Structure formats: structure tokens, C-alpha cells
Amino acid sequence: MPNGAYGAQVSVASGHGSASTDRVMRFVPEFATPAAASQYALDEGVLWVERQTTKPILF
């Protein structure tokens, strides 16, 4: 980032071929190191996937 901090973003892809999707999430917090930004993005991506897979299936 212009101020020397690092931003975090993550991409979660699923599906195959024409049924594939990709969710890109960019986060507001700024981080002092690339490792801290990467860890935050990874943690948030995993939480998002867990929330998606634990939703009840409605018929």
C-alpha cells in the first residue's frame, strides 16, 4: 500500500468448467508484514468456507 503497509485478500474458487465460481474478498485492515496479511486472508477464507458448508440445506 502507499503507506508501506500490506493489504490482505483471498480468492475462493469452486466448481468446474462453466459451473465454476470465484469469490474474491479484500479486507480493510492494514498489516505490518506480508506474513500477517497472508495469515489474516487465509483465516478469513477458511471461516467463509466453513460458513458456506455448514448452512442447512432447504428443499
Image (cartoon, grey):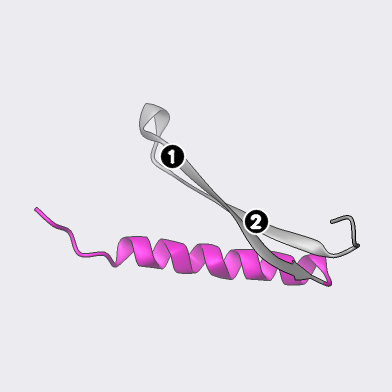
Quadrant in the rendering for residue 2: bottom right
1 or 2: tag closer to the N-terminus: 2
Q: CA distance from mark 1 to mark 2?
A: 17 Å
For numbered disc 1, what is the local secondary structure?
Answer: strand
Residue 56 x %, y % = 20, 64
Position of 18 relative to 57 (above/below): above
Q: What amino acid is labelled 2 in the image?
A: Gln
Q: Residue at x 74, y 72 (%)?
A: 36
Q: Identify the residue position indicated by label 1 in the image.
A: 21
Q: Identify the residue position indicated by label 2 in the image.
A: 9
| Most distant residue in the top direction | 18
Circle 2 residues within 10 Å: few <14, some 14–19, many ≥20: some
Q: Which residues are magenta?
A: 32-59
Query: Is residue 46 shown in magenta?
Result: yes
Query: Is residue 18 shown in magenta?
Result: no
Q: What amino acid is labelled 1 in the image?
A: Thr
